[in-house]
Image (cartoon, grey):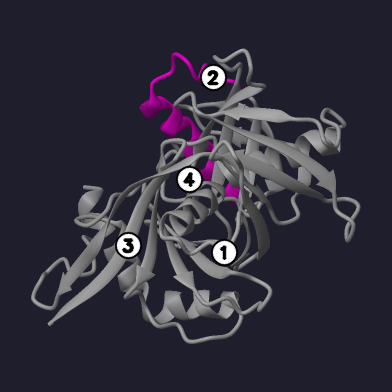
Amino acid sequence: MTQSIEFVDSHTAGEPTRVIVAGGPDLGFGPLPGRVERFRQSADGLRCAMVTEPRGADVLVGALLCEPFDKTCDAGVIFFNNVGYLGMCGHGLIGLVETLRFLGRLGSDACRIETPVGVVNATVERNGEVQFANVASYRKEAGVELSVPGLGKVIGDVAWGGNWFFLTRQPRPSLNTTPISELLQITTRIRRSVNQQGFPEVDHIELFDTPIDPGSNSRNFVLCPGLEYDRSPCGTGTSAKLACLAADGALQAGQRWVQEGILGTSFSGVYHWSDENPERIIPSVSGRAHVTAEGRLLLQDDDPFRLGIPSDVTET
Protein backbone atom coordinates (compact mmCIF):
# COMPACT_ATOMS: atom_id res chain seq x y z
CA MET A 1 0.00 0.00 0.00
CA THR A 2 1.18 3.52 -0.82
CA GLN A 3 -0.21 6.71 0.69
CA SER A 4 -0.06 9.77 -1.57
CA ILE A 5 0.10 13.33 -0.20
CA GLU A 6 -0.14 16.29 -2.57
CA PHE A 7 1.90 19.40 -1.82
CA VAL A 8 3.04 22.76 -3.16
CA ASP A 9 6.39 24.15 -2.04
CA SER A 10 7.33 27.82 -1.89
CA HIS A 11 9.85 30.07 -0.23
CA THR A 12 9.18 33.41 1.43
CA ALA A 13 12.25 35.65 1.43
CA GLY A 14 14.31 32.44 1.41
CA GLU A 15 12.43 30.44 4.06
CA PRO A 16 10.62 27.35 2.68
CA THR A 17 6.98 26.36 3.21
CA ARG A 18 5.30 23.11 2.16
CA VAL A 19 1.53 23.42 1.84
CA ILE A 20 -0.30 20.10 2.07
CA VAL A 21 -3.26 20.43 -0.29
CA ALA A 22 -4.59 16.84 -0.31
CA GLY A 23 -3.96 13.47 1.31
CA GLY A 24 -2.98 14.79 4.73
CA PRO A 25 -4.30 13.42 8.02
CA ASP A 26 -8.05 13.44 8.60
CA LEU A 27 -8.46 15.52 11.75
CA GLY A 28 -12.23 15.80 11.62
CA PHE A 29 -13.94 19.12 12.17
CA GLY A 30 -14.24 21.62 15.01
CA PRO A 31 -12.06 24.45 16.37
CA LEU A 32 -8.49 24.39 15.08
CA PRO A 33 -6.81 24.03 18.52
CA GLY A 34 -8.67 20.75 18.96
CA ARG A 35 -7.59 19.57 15.54
CA VAL A 36 -3.98 20.45 16.36
CA GLU A 37 -4.25 18.22 19.44
CA ARG A 38 -5.66 15.36 17.35
CA PHE A 39 -2.80 15.88 14.90
CA ARG A 40 -0.33 15.66 17.79
CA GLN A 41 -1.92 12.64 19.43
CA SER A 42 -2.92 10.48 16.46
CA ALA A 43 -0.98 11.58 13.37
CA ASP A 44 2.33 13.01 14.56
CA GLY A 45 4.18 10.47 12.45
CA LEU A 46 2.72 12.09 9.35
CA ARG A 47 4.05 15.46 10.52
CA CYS A 48 7.54 13.95 10.50
CA ALA A 49 6.96 12.24 7.16
CA MET A 50 5.87 15.45 5.45
CA VAL A 51 8.66 17.83 6.53
CA THR A 52 11.68 15.88 7.79
CA GLU A 53 14.21 13.65 6.03
CA PRO A 54 14.12 11.82 3.67
CA ARG A 55 11.21 13.75 2.07
CA GLY A 56 12.00 17.12 3.59
CA ALA A 57 14.55 18.94 5.74
CA ASP A 58 14.65 20.38 9.25
CA VAL A 59 14.32 23.94 7.96
CA LEU A 60 11.03 23.18 6.18
CA VAL A 61 7.76 24.46 7.67
CA GLY A 62 4.59 22.57 6.81
CA ALA A 63 1.13 24.07 6.38
CA LEU A 64 -1.85 21.71 6.43
CA LEU A 65 -4.64 23.32 4.44
CA CYS A 66 -7.97 22.51 6.07
CA GLU A 67 -11.62 23.53 6.27
CA PRO A 68 -12.03 26.58 8.54
CA PHE A 69 -14.25 26.34 11.60
CA ASP A 70 -14.96 30.07 11.32
CA LYS A 71 -17.35 30.33 8.38
CA THR A 72 -16.20 33.88 7.60
CA CYS A 73 -12.80 32.50 6.62
CA ASP A 74 -11.66 31.31 3.20
CA ALA A 75 -9.37 28.61 4.54
CA GLY A 76 -7.90 27.13 7.70
CA VAL A 77 -4.28 26.17 8.27
CA ILE A 78 -2.22 24.28 10.82
CA PHE A 79 1.49 25.06 10.75
CA PHE A 80 4.07 22.48 11.83
CA ASN A 81 7.81 21.90 11.68
CA ASN A 82 10.50 19.34 12.46
CA VAL A 83 9.70 19.20 16.18
CA GLY A 84 6.02 20.10 16.56
CA TYR A 85 3.30 22.65 15.87
CA LEU A 86 3.21 26.44 15.52
CA GLY A 87 0.39 28.75 16.54
CA MET A 88 1.09 31.07 13.61
CA CYS A 89 3.83 31.41 11.02
CA GLY A 90 4.31 34.69 9.18
CA HIS A 91 6.45 33.50 6.31
CA GLY A 92 4.26 30.39 6.09
CA LEU A 93 1.09 32.50 5.89
CA ILE A 94 2.59 34.50 3.02
CA GLY A 95 3.62 31.25 1.33
CA LEU A 96 0.15 29.78 1.84
CA VAL A 97 -1.59 32.78 0.25
CA GLU A 98 0.81 32.70 -2.69
CA THR A 99 0.13 28.98 -3.05
CA LEU A 100 -3.64 29.54 -3.06
CA ARG A 101 -3.15 32.24 -5.71
CA PHE A 102 -0.98 29.87 -7.77
CA LEU A 103 -3.66 27.15 -7.56
CA GLY A 104 -6.42 29.58 -8.57
CA ARG A 105 -8.19 29.19 -5.23
CA LEU A 106 -8.35 32.86 -4.29
CA GLY A 107 -11.68 34.44 -5.16
CA SER A 108 -10.20 37.92 -4.82
CA ASP A 109 -7.00 39.64 -3.72
CA ALA A 110 -8.20 39.60 -0.10
CA CYS A 111 -8.78 36.54 2.07
CA ARG A 112 -9.28 35.48 5.68
CA ILE A 113 -7.20 32.61 7.01
CA GLU A 114 -8.05 30.86 10.27
CA THR A 115 -5.06 29.72 12.36
CA PRO A 116 -5.05 27.93 15.73
CA VAL A 117 -4.36 31.27 17.48
CA GLY A 118 -6.79 33.46 15.59
CA VAL A 119 -7.95 34.82 12.24
CA VAL A 120 -5.47 36.55 9.95
CA ASN A 121 -6.55 38.85 7.11
CA ALA A 122 -4.31 38.85 4.05
CA THR A 123 -4.13 40.80 0.81
CA VAL A 124 -2.16 40.22 -2.39
CA GLU A 125 -0.66 43.57 -3.37
CA ARG A 126 -0.10 44.80 -6.92
CA ASN A 127 3.66 44.32 -6.60
CA GLY A 128 3.15 40.63 -5.80
CA GLU A 129 3.75 40.95 -2.08
CA VAL A 130 1.33 39.52 0.46
CA GLN A 131 0.37 41.68 3.42
CA PHE A 132 -1.24 40.06 6.45
CA ALA A 133 -2.78 41.63 9.53
CA ASN A 134 -1.54 39.33 12.28
CA VAL A 135 -3.15 38.31 15.55
CA ALA A 136 -2.94 40.79 18.43
CA SER A 137 0.66 41.04 19.64
CA TYR A 138 2.20 42.36 22.83
CA ARG A 139 5.26 42.50 25.06
CA LYS A 140 4.91 40.34 28.14
CA GLU A 141 8.01 41.51 30.00
CA ALA A 142 10.73 44.06 29.27
CA GLY A 143 14.39 44.10 30.25
CA VAL A 144 14.58 40.47 31.39
CA GLU A 145 18.08 39.73 32.71
CA LEU A 146 19.48 36.23 32.29
CA SER A 147 22.67 34.52 33.35
CA VAL A 148 23.77 32.48 30.33
CA PRO A 149 26.71 30.04 30.51
CA GLY A 150 29.49 31.17 28.20
CA LEU A 151 27.81 34.55 27.55
CA GLY A 152 27.35 36.09 30.98
CA LYS A 153 24.55 38.61 31.43
CA VAL A 154 21.97 38.68 28.64
CA ILE A 155 19.14 41.24 28.51
CA GLY A 156 16.03 41.09 26.37
CA ASP A 157 12.25 41.28 26.07
CA VAL A 158 9.67 38.48 26.06
CA ALA A 159 6.92 39.09 23.52
CA TRP A 160 4.10 37.37 21.64
CA GLY A 161 3.65 37.81 17.89
CA GLY A 162 1.76 34.61 17.14
CA ASN A 163 4.64 32.64 18.70
CA TRP A 164 6.71 33.37 21.83
CA PHE A 165 9.98 35.25 21.42
CA PHE A 166 12.93 36.44 23.44
CA LEU A 167 14.21 39.56 21.67
CA THR A 168 17.81 40.02 22.74
CA ARG A 169 19.02 43.54 23.51
CA GLN A 170 22.44 42.58 24.86
CA PRO A 171 24.77 41.15 23.70
CA ARG A 172 24.69 42.22 20.05
CA PRO A 173 27.07 39.98 18.10
CA SER A 174 27.81 41.09 14.56
CA LEU A 175 25.33 39.39 12.25
CA ASN A 176 27.49 40.34 9.28
CA THR A 177 30.72 38.66 10.40
CA THR A 178 29.80 35.99 12.98
CA PRO A 179 29.47 32.50 11.43
CA ILE A 180 25.98 30.98 11.38
CA SER A 181 27.22 28.06 13.47
CA GLU A 182 28.28 30.46 16.23
CA LEU A 183 25.00 32.39 16.07
CA LEU A 184 23.16 29.08 16.49
CA GLN A 185 25.26 28.26 19.56
CA ILE A 186 24.60 31.69 21.08
CA THR A 187 20.84 31.58 20.53
CA THR A 188 20.55 27.97 21.68
CA ARG A 189 22.27 28.88 24.97
CA ILE A 190 20.00 31.88 25.40
CA ARG A 191 16.88 29.82 24.80
CA ARG A 192 17.93 27.18 27.30
CA SER A 193 18.47 29.88 29.93
CA VAL A 194 15.21 31.70 29.08
CA ASN A 195 13.29 28.46 29.54
CA GLN A 196 15.06 27.62 32.80
CA GLN A 197 14.78 31.12 34.25
CA GLY A 198 11.05 31.71 34.14
CA PHE A 199 9.82 31.59 30.54
CA PRO A 200 9.32 27.96 29.44
CA GLU A 201 6.91 29.07 26.69
CA VAL A 202 9.61 30.89 24.67
CA ASP A 203 10.79 28.83 21.70
CA HIS A 204 12.12 31.55 19.35
CA ILE A 205 15.21 33.71 20.00
CA GLU A 206 16.03 36.90 18.07
CA LEU A 207 19.33 38.71 17.78
CA PHE A 208 19.59 42.18 16.22
CA ASP A 209 22.25 44.25 14.48
CA THR A 210 22.69 47.20 12.13
CA PRO A 211 21.22 46.40 8.68
CA ILE A 212 23.24 46.18 5.49
CA ASP A 213 20.58 47.86 3.34
CA PRO A 214 20.29 51.56 4.28
CA GLY A 215 16.56 51.29 3.60
CA SER A 216 16.13 48.80 6.45
CA ASN A 217 15.75 49.63 10.13
CA SER A 218 17.30 46.51 11.64
CA ARG A 219 18.85 43.14 10.79
CA ASN A 220 17.92 39.99 12.68
CA PHE A 221 18.83 36.37 13.24
CA VAL A 222 16.08 34.07 14.51
CA LEU A 223 16.45 30.68 16.14
CA CYS A 224 13.36 28.53 15.45
CA PRO A 225 11.93 25.81 17.75
CA GLY A 226 13.68 22.94 15.96
CA LEU A 227 17.11 24.60 16.30
CA GLU A 228 17.16 25.76 12.68
CA TYR A 229 17.51 29.46 11.85
CA ASP A 230 14.89 31.42 9.94
CA ARG A 231 16.15 32.32 6.48
CA SER A 232 13.50 35.05 6.27
CA PRO A 233 13.16 38.06 8.60
CA CYS A 234 10.42 36.06 10.43
CA GLY A 235 6.85 37.34 10.26
CA THR A 236 5.80 36.54 13.83
CA GLY A 237 9.22 37.75 15.02
CA THR A 238 8.71 41.04 13.19
CA SER A 239 5.29 41.28 14.86
CA ALA A 240 6.90 40.75 18.27
CA LYS A 241 9.49 43.39 17.43
CA LEU A 242 6.77 45.89 16.50
CA ALA A 243 5.03 45.15 19.80
CA CYS A 244 8.21 45.98 21.72
CA LEU A 245 8.85 49.14 19.72
CA ALA A 246 5.25 50.25 20.31
CA ALA A 247 5.52 49.56 24.03
CA ASP A 248 8.72 51.65 24.21
CA GLY A 249 7.19 54.50 22.20
CA ALA A 250 10.01 54.04 19.69
CA LEU A 251 7.68 53.48 16.70
CA GLN A 252 4.36 55.22 16.18
CA ALA A 253 1.18 53.62 14.88
CA GLY A 254 1.22 53.67 11.08
CA GLN A 255 4.99 54.25 10.93
CA ARG A 256 6.78 51.80 8.64
CA TRP A 257 9.47 49.43 9.95
CA VAL A 258 11.68 47.39 7.60
CA GLN A 259 13.11 44.21 9.13
CA GLU A 260 16.07 42.71 7.31
CA GLY A 261 16.78 39.00 7.69
CA ILE A 262 20.07 37.14 7.81
CA LEU A 263 19.97 36.56 4.00
CA GLY A 264 19.47 40.26 3.29
CA THR A 265 15.80 39.88 2.33
CA SER A 266 13.27 42.03 4.16
CA PHE A 267 9.73 42.29 5.51
CA SER A 268 8.02 45.62 6.09
CA GLY A 269 5.61 46.18 8.93
CA VAL A 270 3.26 48.73 10.46
CA TYR A 271 0.84 48.47 13.35
CA HIS A 272 -2.24 49.98 14.91
CA TRP A 273 -3.46 49.64 18.47
CA SER A 274 -6.06 46.96 19.06
CA ASP A 275 -9.62 48.18 19.58
CA GLU A 276 -10.38 45.20 21.83
CA ASN A 277 -7.28 45.51 24.00
CA PRO A 278 -5.59 48.93 24.01
CA GLU A 279 -2.36 47.43 25.39
CA ARG A 280 -1.90 45.21 22.35
CA ILE A 281 -1.17 45.98 18.72
CA ILE A 282 -2.36 44.57 15.41
CA PRO A 283 0.78 44.26 13.27
CA SER A 284 0.60 44.14 9.48
CA VAL A 285 3.57 42.49 7.77
CA SER A 286 4.39 42.37 4.06
CA GLY A 287 6.69 40.02 2.15
CA ARG A 288 7.07 38.12 -1.10
CA ALA A 289 6.80 34.38 -1.71
CA HIS A 290 7.60 32.31 -4.78
CA VAL A 291 6.26 28.85 -5.62
CA THR A 292 9.15 26.44 -6.17
CA ALA A 293 7.61 22.99 -6.71
CA GLU A 294 4.46 20.89 -6.66
CA GLY A 295 4.11 17.15 -6.46
CA ARG A 296 3.23 14.09 -4.37
CA LEU A 297 4.89 12.54 -1.38
CA LEU A 298 4.71 8.74 -1.47
CA LEU A 299 4.61 6.76 1.78
CA GLN A 300 5.00 3.04 1.16
CA ASP A 301 4.09 0.56 3.90
CA ASP A 302 7.38 -1.37 3.58
CA ASP A 303 9.55 1.77 3.69
CA PRO A 304 11.50 1.77 6.99
CA PHE A 305 11.49 5.58 6.84
CA ARG A 306 7.83 5.94 5.84
CA LEU A 307 7.33 8.33 8.76
CA GLY A 308 10.70 10.06 8.45
CA ILE A 309 14.09 9.43 9.99
CA PRO A 310 14.07 9.70 13.81
CA SER A 311 15.70 12.90 15.02
CA ASP A 312 17.98 11.01 17.39
CA VAL A 313 19.52 9.35 14.30
CA THR A 314 19.99 12.53 12.23
CA GLU A 315 21.51 14.41 15.20
CA THR A 316 24.27 11.86 15.83
| Residue at mark 4 | 224
Residue range (magenta): 171-198
61 vs 250, left or right, is left
Asked which quadrant contains residue 145, the reply is top right
Label 4 neighbourhood size at 10 Å, few (<14), some (14-19), many (20+)?
many
Q: Secondary structure at mark 4?
A: loop
Real-space CA distance between mark 1 and mark 4, rounded to the nearest whole angstrom: 33 Å
| Residue at mark 1 | 107
Quadrant in which the N terminus appears: bottom left
Q: Which badge, 2 or 3, comes first in the chain's sequence?
A: 3
| Residue at mark 2 | 173
Q: Secondary structure at mark 3?
A: strand
The front one of 253 and 88 is 253
Real-space CA distance between mark 2 and mark 3, rounded to the nearest whole angstrom: 38 Å
Q: Amino acid at mark 2?
A: Pro
1 or 3: mark nearer the eye: 1
Q: Which badge, 2 or 4, comes first in the chain's sequence?
A: 2
1 or 4: mark nearer the eye: 1
Q: Is residue 91 above or below residue 305?
A: above
Q: Do residues under tags 1 and 3 come within 8 Å of each other at their CB atoms?
A: no
The front one of 275 and 124 is 124
| Residue at mark 3 | 7
Please check the rendered image and state whether residue 124 is part of the magenta-colored stretch, yes or no: no
Q: Secondary structure at mark 1?
A: loop
